[in-house]
Amino acid sequence: MFKLERVKKLYLVFYNWCLSPSEKMDRVHCFRTHLLIMITLITGALMWSYAFIAYFYIDHTSIKYMGFIYALIHLFTPIYYKITESLEKSIYVMLLPGGMFQVHFSVLTGGFFTPVLMWVAILPVIAGVVTNKLHTFIWFVIIFITSIIIAYLDISQGMFEINYLHENGKFLTQFLTGFGIMLLHSGFIIFLLNLRDLSEEQLRKKVLSKQNLLRVLAHDVSNPLTIIRNNMSFLNKQALVSDLDQIHPKFKRKLSLTLKSSNTISDLIHAVREIEAFDSGKKDLQLFEISLKDCIEESLEILSSMISVKRIHMRVVIEDEEVWGIKSVIIHQVICNILSNCIKFSAEKSDILVHTKVVENQVHLIIKDHGIGIPTALLKKIFDPLATTTREGTEGEKGTGFGMPIAKRSIEMIGGNIHVTSRTLKEHKEDHGTIFKITFQKVAEEIKSIV
């Protein structure tokens, strides 16, 4: 037990020496570094075993000492990682000599039909678990081409007919090949399961962190906001009962607008709390009968400054339909997000059409602009909250890339959907722009009559 602890301490000293200081906080990278070192040790032991088999049991001068050279270069993998701080570069120091040794050993011991050639199949797996998909594909191409060449030279040209391996070495070779591959594959499965658990843990921590931040904001902002609302309500009442000649009309308008904005923020905080409780499974989300026309009109009022700055012509053709939803969510997280996006990517004095259409038990809100459009590559990930989709508007307007994912999440939460099509200015000079179709669940007539 004491010796095992000493070995563990020595390993950790070596690991900490190898690990890049800039990556010590990245648990996944640390995990992959552990794996790089462990694979080096395990495959190193296998390579040295094959090197001794080649030295004692293969009658060919080209491999007697080359096996030891291959194995020695392979062992420098962690050192190379220490120098370069790159797992991607280091993996080639491991796999290139390993792959060359396997091919060299194979062509001298049966060519395409030797079991040793199966070792090349493990190379893309090692590349994948330590690095990424790109290097997995690169190594797949390398071993595929290599295997095809060996098969062609062996079967068609008969170049590897002579087997230089002694009978005494065949058992050792088969033993190392069979049990070595089983050992490595089992180790990789354990690694992948541990990596999955680690990734899930990190994801859980991020979700909890965001939830806690949301709770703090919703709770701490609501307290001072209540004071602001109360004070604004008091001032507004005083303005109403005071002599009109003593109060400037502009002051009264500003006072009324500030009170309205405070109430809007309060509604948003309440909606956020409801959504968070719904996501946490603490309560069901309560939907209300909402006038879609009112939501559109309030959204246009909120965005009026953006509209006037770019002198956008809003063509609004809407029916007063009742839909299920939460008013603050529909206004701020759905309609305002989409409308502001349309305005941002529209040229000055452009037209934006907003109209509604009833289709069976649904109401479709269609927003169509004549802007620069969304490129196909960007359109595919516009609703992905993890993708980078930010770009400047036609007048250099900045964005965060959060608007569209928020809109999609919000509309789906209240039982609706969102669909977008786009034609870019670059590809369609005459007919370009973006069309958003937002689907809401219509309130049935029999429910209206009951109410």
Image (spheres, rainbow, N blue to C red):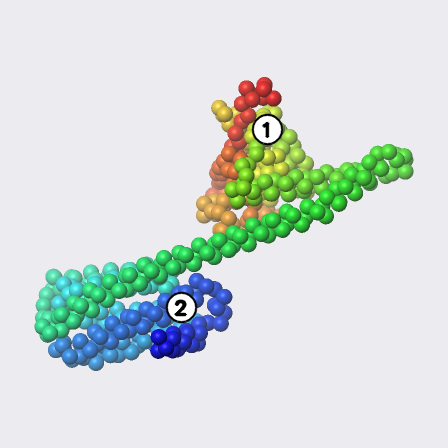
Q: Of the residues under marks 2 and 1, which one precedes in the sequence?
A: 2
Q: Position of residue 273 (x, y in %)?
A: 60, 43
Please name the residue that numbered disc 2 is placed on: 33
Asked whether, in this view, residue 408 is left or right of residue 68, the answer is right
Quarter of the image for the N terminus: give it. bottom left
| Residue drawn at 57 percent across, 39 percent down | 334
- Helix or strand or loop: what does disc 1 sit on? strand
Which picture quadrant has residue 403?
top right
Could you say which is closer to the camera, residue 343 or residue 134?
Answer: 134
Which picture quadrant has residue 407?
top right
Q: Amino acid at mark 2?
A: Thr
Could you say which is closer to the camera, residue 67 or residue 297?
Answer: 67
Real-space CA distance between mark 2 and mark 1, rounded to the nearest whole angstrom: 56 Å
Asked whether, in this view, residue 441 is left or right of residue 16, the answer is right
Quarter of the image for the C terminus: give it. top right
Q: State whether residue 145 is above or below residue 6.
A: above
Please name the residue that numbered disc 1 is placed on: 289
| Residue drawn at 47 percent across, 44 percent down | 379
Q: Position of residue 13 (x, y in %)?
A: 42, 77
Could you say which is closer to the camera, residue 320 or residue 157?
Answer: 320
Q: Position of residue 88 (x, y in %)?
A: 38, 66
Q: Position of residue 380 (x, y in %)?
A: 45, 45
Q: Amino acid at mark 1?
A: Glu
Q: Is residue 99 visible?
A: yes
